[in-house]
Image: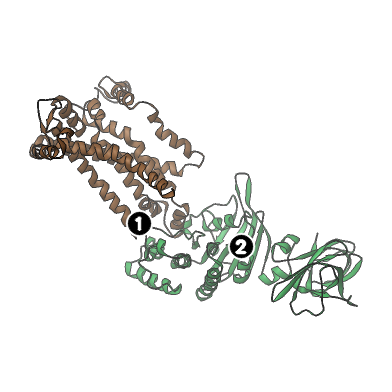
Chain colours: A green, B brown
């Protein structure tokens, strides 16, 4: 990896007695779309404010382009932010808002005007120069906020829950535009969000935060398919987490015992599991199959159907296994065989559909 | 029934305005158009409802603009207006220069301190206004506390002559109305989204330039309101110039008092009051215009 654009080195920050950011290290490469994902209060916003320079770390260092900026005030950092409330200056028109950063640098009015027009074209808001922020719709405000944050050509753009104020349809539209702008400009984006769909859709890598620390950093697909812990498995999407006991573990092929039955899981697990160890497996609902008859081979769980929800394209099932665990299965709505509530059913999953997690 | 209730609700403030603003104003206006007379009451014509409608019309025919023409032609009166404007304007300026940093500090104080600071700002009102003005006499006069302290410290060789000067009037006015300047400015600063200043700093502004480009312009409505709340009462103030000022520091308030009670020229006093009202309406209208322009854009 060449020199990362942003490097966070063992950064901690406490507010009073709460440790908001707890010994976090991460790196973001140039041109990357990175997401900080976590429930509210997990420290993601604090971490972003540390990067922007609104807070200074109690411990650790922050590098931008290899330079230690830990002690720099916000205006000295090549980082700009798109605020959750957009924070457009209400007493300035759109052009003055977008040109604000350039004016602070003492650029000529002509150059500022040209850049403002370019930025407005980028966010498809040509002709809005003279409008006041209060006369703009939510989506227009978001676009102006994006244009304003990008006008100063930052190396890294921070986006603080930028879509949370928009309705669903608009959110998808702006989401798409953000991705397009990011690709076109090649600027690194760091988005903070609690919405996993948003993070999954936009980011090339996601850092999941919990209680001020990093739970996992991975690409969206890996995060979903190979969660690092039970907590991540449950936080990202729907997960069936089942207790298991290791019988044998050879070269990523793990034999487990679940509820008295033998299961085989092929997990490119980084760690070896000792026979007899108590573990858990995580299987996504859509990676499970439903059968009326017990399959002769493979990984099988048996139980009783307790809930059937028809969702159009798919059907969601809840099955109470014989050991008491409730498992959610999602099948296509074209599933063969008739199943009724209370009927006995069998669940199977492929060896590579599961992830083995330490307890 | 509902609409009746609604009308009653609407009528209450209207009746209030009518009884305590429009009616007194009409009486003063009528007085200002009358002629002074050695009589009880000391003016004519006197409206007498028993004369009937035409009697009232007959009385109204005796109205005269004599008081106004005297007011506008005599340099003494004009001088009083000009010096009132000057003193009130100066006091407003000083109050803004002191009040704005005060309000700014209050708005930047930790959240749990703010209510206490607001209470402290209005705490002087818990003591009688008159008592506080007398206290200033004790402080400012030649052998007062201030001069004692300064002489004692050896900072001055002889007592400063502050009491009974325009300086004392300014001190009194600024002191008395400072809270009215501070609170609207504080309110305007307090309700500003702190993300705006962060955004400015994020976009390359230093703390100073963020203040002048964002915080200050956004606090202008509070600044206007604070200036008006200082300027308007200062213009008509009577007690402070009377007690702290010298005999030469005539302000409109003292003029009104003298016309009413010493000269017993009620029409003249009323005319002076009406002109004062006109003078005070001008900045109010400007403020209104600025506000509605703000709302339009």
Proximity of marks 1 and 2: CB atoms separated by less than 8 Å: no
Number of other residues with Cα within 10 Å of mark 2, as a class: few under 14, some 14 to 19, many 20 or more: many
Q: Mark 1 or 2, which is nearer the eye?
A: 1
Q: Give the image location of residue A148, x and y in percent.
A: 44, 65
Side of B49 relative to A39 (left or right): left
Residue drawn at x 14%, y 32% is: B46
Residue B121 position, x and y percent, is: 40, 35
Viewer-proximal residue among B289 and B83: B289
Q: Could you say whether the residue bearing mark 2 is in a helix, strand or loop?
A: strand
Q: Quadrant of the C terminus of chain A?
A: bottom right
Does B22 appear above or below A292?
above
Distance in Å between CA atoms under marks 1 and 2: 39 Å
Question: For numbered disc 1, what is the local secondary structure?
Answer: helix
Q: Give the percent coordinates (x, y) of residue B6.
A: 41, 47
Quarter of the image where one finds residue B53? top left
Residue highlighted by disc 2: A36
Q: Identify the residue at image location x=51%, y=67%.
A: A155
Look at mark 1 in the image and give the residue it sits on.
B295
B244 vs A122, left or right, is left
């Amino acid at each position: 990896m060449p020199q990362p654009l942003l490097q966070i080195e063992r950064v901690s920050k406490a507010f009073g007695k709460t440790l908001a950011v707890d010994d976090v290290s991460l790196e973001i490469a140039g041109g990357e779309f990175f997401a900080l994902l976590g429930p509210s209060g997990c420290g993601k916003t604090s971490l972003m404010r540390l990067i922007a320079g609104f807070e200074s770390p109690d411990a650790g260092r922050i590098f931008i382009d290899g330079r230690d900026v830990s002690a720099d005030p916000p205006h000295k950092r090549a980082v700009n932010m798109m605020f959750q409330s957009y924070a457009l200056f209400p007493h300035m028109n759109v052009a003055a808002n977008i040109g604000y950063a350039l004016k602070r640098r003492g650029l000529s009015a002509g150059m500022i005007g040209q850049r403002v027009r370019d930025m407005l074209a980028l966010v498809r808001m040509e002709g809005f120069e003279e409008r006041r922020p209060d006369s703009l719709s939510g989506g227009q405000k978001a676009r102006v906020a994006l244009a304003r944050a990008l006008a100063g050509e930052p190396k890294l753009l921070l986006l603080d829950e930028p879509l949370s104020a928009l309705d669903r349809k608009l959110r998808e539209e702006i989401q798409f535009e953000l991705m397009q702008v990011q690709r076109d400009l090649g600027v690194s984006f760091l988005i903070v969000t609690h919405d996993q769909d948003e993070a999954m859709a936009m980011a090339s890598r996601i850092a999941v935060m919990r209680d001020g620390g990093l739970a996992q950093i991975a690409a969206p697909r890996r995060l979903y398919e190979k969660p690092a812990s039970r907590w991540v498995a449950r936080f990202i999407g729907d997960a069936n987490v089942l207790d298991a006991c290791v019988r044998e573990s050879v070269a990523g092929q793990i034999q487990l015992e679940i509820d008295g039955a033998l299961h085989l899981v092929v997990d490119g697990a980084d760690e070896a599991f000792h026979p007899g160890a108590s573990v858990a497996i995580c299987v996504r609902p859509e990676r499970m199959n439903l059968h009326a008859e017990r399959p002769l081979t493979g990984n099988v769980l048996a139980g009783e159907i307790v809930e059937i929800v028809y969702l159009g394209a798919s059907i969601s099932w809840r099955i109470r296994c014989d050991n008491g665990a409730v498992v959610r299965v999602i099948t296509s709505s074209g599933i063969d065989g008739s199943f009724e509530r209370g009927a006995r059913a069998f669940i199977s999953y492929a060896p590579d559909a599961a992830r083995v997690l330490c307890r | 029934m509902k609409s009746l209730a609604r009308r009653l609700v609407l009528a209450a403030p209207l009746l209030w305005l009518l009884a305590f603003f429009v009616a007194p104003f009409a009486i003063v206006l009528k007085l200002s158009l009358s002629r002074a007379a050695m009589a009880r009451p000391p003016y004519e014509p006197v409206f007498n409802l028993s004369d009937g409608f035409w009697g009232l019309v007959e009385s109204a025919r005796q109205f005269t603009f004599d008081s106004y023409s005297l007011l506008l032609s005599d340099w003494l009166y004009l001088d009083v207006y000009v010096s009132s404007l000057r003193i009130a304007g100066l006091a407003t300026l000083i109050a803004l220069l002191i009040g704005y940093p005060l309000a700014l500090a209050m708005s930047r104080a930790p959240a749990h301190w703010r209510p206490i600071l607001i209470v402290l700002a209005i705490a002087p009102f818990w003591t009688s206004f008159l008592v506080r003005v007398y206290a200033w006499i004790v402080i400012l006069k030649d052998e007062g506390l201030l001069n004692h302290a300064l002489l004692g410290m050896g900072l001055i060789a002889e007592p400063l002559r502050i009491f009974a000067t325009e300086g004392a009037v300014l001190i009194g006015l600024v002191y008395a109305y400072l809270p009215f300047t501070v609170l609207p400015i504080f309110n305007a600063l307090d309700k500003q989204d702190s993300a705006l200043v962060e955004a400015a700093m994020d976009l390359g502004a230093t703390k100073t330039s963020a203040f002048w480009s964002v915080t200050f312009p956004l606090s202008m409505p509070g600044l206007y309101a604070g200036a008006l709340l200082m300027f308007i009462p200062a213009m008509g103030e009577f007690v402070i110039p009377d007690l702290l000022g010298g005999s030469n520091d005539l302000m409109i308030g003292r003029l009104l008092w003298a016309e009413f009670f010493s000269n017993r020229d009620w029409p003249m006093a009323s005319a002076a009051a009406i002109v004062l009202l006109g003078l005070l309406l001008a900045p109010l209208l400007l403020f209104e215009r600025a506000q509605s322009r703000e709302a339009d854009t």
